[in-house]
Image: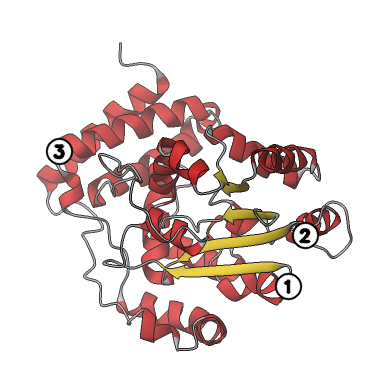
Amino acid sequence: MVSPTLVLHVGIHKTASTYIQHRLKRNQPFLRQHGLLYPKKRRDHLRLVKALRQGNLRPWGKLLDRAARKGCRPLVSAEILSLVLAEPSRCTSGGTLLADLLLFLERRGVALELVAFLRDQPAYLNSRYTQLIKRLYFGVSFERYLARTMRSGGESACDFEELFGEALASAQVRCSFLPFRAGDGDPCERLLQAVGVADCTGLQPLDQRANAQPGWQAVWIAQRLARRLQHQHPKAWRSPVCKARIREALERLALEQGWQAEPYQGLSAPLLNRLEERYGASNDRFAQRVWGCSWRELFPLPLPQPSPQAPRDRAERRELLAVAQWLLAEGLGESA
């Protein structure tokens, strides 16, 4: 008899979540064989997140009922949950969305199993910045993005003590925190092993992984396009369709030009020191509590080599500005 448990894979962002989700989607029979029910459509996972934010737990109840009929544990994967669970409750004063979910599960006699991959903040924030900037989420510099994140968290909050302290303190939650580092093995298989799938033989592979870093040239272009849209084309700035056209064209171009060969790296010694001052003590407390060691035993202090932050000569600048102009025309629908 399968124990009544809800399994949440909550990211964090930039820890191969997209790859994991695609591979889980491809391996429905394998998951069923091992007692896991994984909603096949990405939008089903996101609808659950949206419902939780709205204080509507009925979709979660339907998922639990469906899983119980099949004798499975439901597995939900949404990296945004790493941030959402710590958001304030809409139902109780001073509570969180995690507390709302736990109360709902307790009434149904269901436990919660939470799995998260964690990265060292320097690597995480550099990678997260490139993701957000290529989506034209904002137009700020990397240094300003770091300052804002260290001050108020926001879309890139990564103080793991703050994000996951409540889950760790709850007897109703079983937490598995997995270091995300090069050489640690396939993340999808590590996730499944963490939730009790001892043998991943038979898990079908994927041909490739998604979300490649677009390179510093793409970041430089995206920074300028975001600011130009924001100040000169406010309607387009508010248009997801326009931004999606630009992002898709930029990603194709980056692949064609081989810009991935020079990944964006915005970290410098002063910025690393600021990150260590902000997160070092919290990281160590978290690591001792979860893994029984210091943070730096798992994540050695990085020594990144900064990438170019701007074109290296006038010719390269002219070339990239021409690309930016073409991409803007694509986004505005003026390229025909």
Q: Secondary structure at mark 1?
A: loop
Identify which residue is drawn at 50% across, 82% down.
Answer: 287
Q: Can you give x and y, in whole percent of width and height, for residue 110 in the image?
A: 75, 56
Q: Is residue 311 above or below residue 231?
A: below
What is the three-letter code of the residue carrying label 1? Answer: Ser
Answer whether labels 2 and 1 touch (C-beta < 8 Å): yes
Residue for point 66% across, 41% down: 67
Question: Which quadrant, please, contains the C terminus?
Answer: top left
Q: Foreground: 140 or 201?
A: 201
Residue 292 position, x and y percent, is: 50, 88
- Give the mark nearer the N terminus: 3 vs 1: 1
Q: Residue 160, relative to residue 40: is it above or below? A: below
Residue under label 3: 257
Amino acid at pointer 2: Leu
Q: Position of residue 12 (x, y in %)?
A: 50, 59
Q: Which residue is mark 1?
A: 170
Q: Nearer the viewer, mark 3 or mark 1?
A: 1
Distance Cα–Cα, label 2 vs label 1: 9 Å
Residue topped by disc 2: 102
Tell me the amino acid under the disc marked 3.
Gln
Q: Helix, strand or loop at disc 3?
A: helix
Q: Is residue 39 above or below residue 9?
A: above
- Dot 2, how many residues are within 10 Å of its Cα: few (below 14), some (14-19), or many (20+)? some
Q: CA distance from mark 3 to mark 2?
A: 49 Å
Which of the two residues, 208 or 306, is positioned nearer the viewer here?
208
